[in-house]
Image: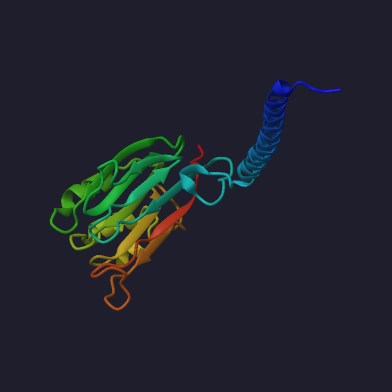
Amino acid sequence: WEFPFGQQPLVVVVAIFLLTFYVISQVFEIKMDANLGHIFARSALDAAARSTKPPRYKCGISKACPEKHFAFKMASGAANVVGPKICVEDNVLMSGVKNNVGRGINVALVNGKTGEPLDTKFFDMWGGDVAPFIEFLKSIQDGTIVLMGTYDDGATKLNEEARKLIAELGSTSITNLGFRDNWVFCGGKGIKTKSPFEQHIKNNKDTNKYEGWPEVVEMEGCIPQKQD
């Protein structure tokens, strides 16, 4: 009993091919399983990250405001380099990016009933004139929310009349605001009490963060809606 010699090489080649195919398929299946496992693991991690991501509140404040309150966040200028920023109800009213801030006192007016922005202006209290600022303060209507922030120097040209008008909006620190102090304030025309929304840092060469200027002051909170 004999097998023809001519058929043996073919049998060996077929066997090697089948063995090679089997090994490759097994390796590919293992890699596929690993890749699928990695994909599913990443999907699970991404879903977990999304579920644990902290919620974002209006203007980026730390907690949600109660009903009938307006969220706000603001910061004074940084030295004479970065301008102040004022945000109300997730609407950035003034900032360096919007190119509507300037040296001195920056002011944003907001409707106390609706939260809608009314006006934004800045008044140079270093090289400018205080008279236009006084006229502006006198023109503010009752029920208007007033937000103010300094940039560079907001005090040199302030006189007693201007300080008194700002104090009537609810400010306590305005009487002590000095050269290159940093100050942010939120009050209102017709307010009957002093505002709790005010931050003030004195210009002091021993404690200044920047050469010639104190550190930035920031403030956030919830402004009560004006009721009829």
88 displayed left or right of 68: left
Q: Nearer the viewer, residue 125 or 97?
A: 97
Give coordinates of residue 99: x percent, y percent.
25, 42
Q: Is residue 155 above or below residue 94?
A: below
Q: Nearer the viewer, residue 92 or 191?
A: 92
Question: Which residue is outermost to the front?
Answer: 1
For image coordinates 66% across by 36% down, the residue present is 36
Question: Which residue is outermost to the bottom?
Answer: 206
Q: Is residue 8 above or below residue 94?
A: above
The type of colouring in the image is rainbow
Question: Which residue is outermost to the right?
Answer: 1
Q: Is residue 151 above or below residue 92?
A: below
For image coordinates 28% across by 59% down, the residue present is 163
For image coordinates 33% across by 60% down, the residue present is 183
Q: Is residue 77 above or below residue 18?
A: below
Looking at the rendering, which quadrant does residue 145 occupy? Answer: top left
Q: Nearer the viewer, residue 20 or 26?
A: 20
**Position of the N terminus by quadrant:** top right
For image coordinates 45% across by 40% down, the residue present is 90
Give coordinates of residue 67: x percent, y percent.
58, 41
Q: Nearer the viewer, residue 87 or 30?
A: 30
Number of dots carrying numbers: 0
Please say whether residue 97 is visible from this viewpoint: yes
Give coordinates of residue 82: x percent, y percent.
27, 54
Looking at the rendering, which quadrant does residue 18 occupy? Answer: top right
Give coordinates of residue 202: x percent, y percent.
32, 70
157 displayed left or right of 218: left
Please say whether residue 189 is visible from this viewpoint: no
